[in-house]
Amino acid sequence: MERKVGSSTLTAKEVKAALEKSTTLTAEEEKALRMRHGAGAPSQTAPLPRAAGANAELADELLVIEMQLMKAMRARTGQTRTAANAAKAPAAVRTRETPANAAKDKIVRALRAKKK
């Protein structure tokens, strides 16, 4: 068998197509290949891969954990369940019961000025 002497060039499109078909690579290997050859992510609208894979029991456990975390986040931030309810909520108004915090106001003003 004769050895090839010439070199070959891979394009980003070829690497991207090959990576989409591949099922044996780990996440780190795929990331390294994408970075090495400049092949971007498969699609901006493609769904994210599931951590549970085909394991239904693990998928259920992860769903329960995700629901608990979302509930805790909503409780911590005071968010409502739907975006429609959030749009109807009135803006916070400073009243006499809530004294003005001068340091906080100063920081907020500085950040707003920096943003502009």
Image (spheres, helix red, strand yellow):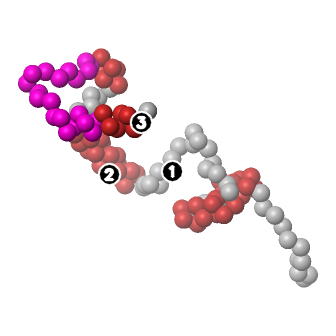
Q: Residue at x 47, y 51 (%)?
A: 50
Q: Is residue 6 left or right of 109 when viewed as pictured? A: right
Question: Which element type, helix, strand or loop, lies under badge 3?
Answer: helix
- Location of the C terminus by quadrant is top left
Which of pointers 2 and 1 indicates the residue nearer the eye? 1
The image's mark for residue 105 is none
* Residue 104 picture location, percent across and down: 21, 37
Image position of 36 (left or right of 104)? right
Residue 66 versus residue 98 in the image, above or below: below
The majority secondary structure of the magenta stretch comes to loop
Residue 21 showing in the rendered view: no
The residue that mark 2 highlights is: 61
Residue in the image at 88% along x and 77% along y: 4
**Residue where numbered disc 1 is placed:** 49
Q: Given this view, does label 3 or label 1 mark the residue nearer the observer?
A: 3
What range of the chain is rendered magenta? 89-108
- Of 32 and 106, which appears nearest the observer? 106
Residue 115 tag number: 3
What amino acid type should be assigned to the residue bearing mark 3?
Lys
Q: Is 102 rendered above or below residue 53? A: above
